[in-house]
Amino acid sequence: MGAYLDHAATTPMRPEAVAAMLPFLTERFGNPSGVHAVARAARRAMDDARESVAADLGARPAEVVFTGSGTEADNLALVGVHSRRGGAVVCTAVEHHAVLETCRALGGRVVPVRADGQLDLDALADALDPTVSVVSVMLANNEVGTVQPLAEVVALTRERAPDALVHTDAVQAVPWLDVASLAGGADLLAVSAHKFGGPKGVGALVVRQGAQLDPIIHGGGQERDRRSGTHNVAGIVAMAAALRVTAAARPEVVTSVGRLRDRLADGLLAAVPGAQETGSRQHKVAGNCHLRFPGVESEALLVLLDEAGVFASAGSACASGALEPSHVLVAMGLSAAEAGSSVRLSLGAGSTQGDVDLALEVVPKAVADLRG
Ligand code: PLP
């Protein structure tokens, strides 16, 4: 079926997650907010899922708030804290739109990054003061894969904005990083199931004990009044199963996919004249290969790749198709032309040597065709 190299956009579901979810779409269909036996069975499954997700994210079960997406988890973090406490919101210039647009809507401050995509800690220090109520820094970037120095962010925030909560968007980090330990100091942490082999439309926000926020969705008071709405039990159970397998497989996956990524990136850099890599490989997740092919328009290249069975993307899924250059690449100091010649090839747990072989065969030829 070709080479799927767009795992940062979404991943295929893990078989374990599909198997875990099916009974809750059929015979175990109860509403976990009810009191009778059918409802209680659904409740028990959800409680188990909550314990499992909490354990894998280094949280307590009561700290896990199930949401309808990673986007919603990010919104709950920023809007929820701002609604409760006012104050200023701070985020980096390379956040996913779920954070960046929310920060902007709240009149927040956007902190620049360095050319390698890592947060400029001096600029963060300048943006922090005691009026800040929430600081949002992603753990891993969705376009370039850059891993941010979260422990430093937490330490700086505690020093300069002692009342502020630190939120981290860990949506892209889960398959690659030990989120529980790297984000251990954060007060709020967002994940999304479809980025690690779970279904779309379900996520979670970890809200550490004592971190206070208002709900953004009002209603029946589910999730301890932090997120109303009948639970997506099947999705929640599947997310827990996907997270468990992902966490167990992670060390092996990081090693094997990291090798595949290196072969892909090095192979393309060698085969395509003028090709350049975006960001620093030492500071990015193992599945990310982000390259620029000067003189080639990424949208045209993606069409040729698609025809040849290589499925990749130009940036974030929401941004591709738009003519605006990626805000992440612009924030890293790339010109509009450089940003417009970029392709993201993102590998995942199921990626194979065959996928890399096909990309190594197809991409140089497509670039040459477009240049010719
Ligand atoms: N944050 C990051 C870093 C992402 O990559 C994404 C997905 O594209 C999201 C948030 C949004 O997650 P969801 O697709 O579940 O709304």
Image (tube, grey):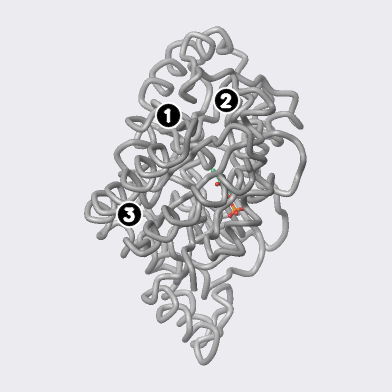
x and y percentages locating residue 12 in the rendered image: 47, 68
Q: Are marks 2 and 3 in contact (CB under 8 Å)?
A: no
Distance Cα–Cα, label 2 vs label 3: 26 Å
* Corner quadrant of residue 152: top left
Callout in the foreground (3, 1): 1
**Tag 2: Cα neighbours inside 10 Å, few (<14), some, or many (≥20)?**
many
Residue placed at 62% from the left, 55% from the top?
227
x and y percentages locating residue 218 in the rendered image: 72, 54
Say which quadrant the C terminus sits in. top right
Distance Cα–Cα, label 3 vs label 1: 20 Å
Q: Secondary structure at mark 2?
A: strand
Residue placed at 59% from the left, 32% from the top?
294
Q: Is residue 231 above or below residue 60?
A: below
Q: Is 161 on the left-hand or right-hand side of 353?
A: right
Question: What residue is shown with label 3?
Answer: 56
Is tag 3's residue or tag 1's residue first in the polypeptide sequence?
3
The tally of labels here is 3
Question: What residue is shown with label 2?
Answer: 92
Residue type highlighted by circle 3? Asp
Residue placed at 58% from the left, 18% from the top?
112
Q: Is 241 on the left-hand or right-hand side of 272?
A: left
User: In front here: 180 or 254?
Assistant: 254
Q: Secondary structure at mark 1?
A: loop
Examine the rendering and report whether any part of residue 51 can be seen.
no
Q: Secondary structure at mark 3?
A: helix
x and y percentages locating residue 259 in the rendered image: 27, 48
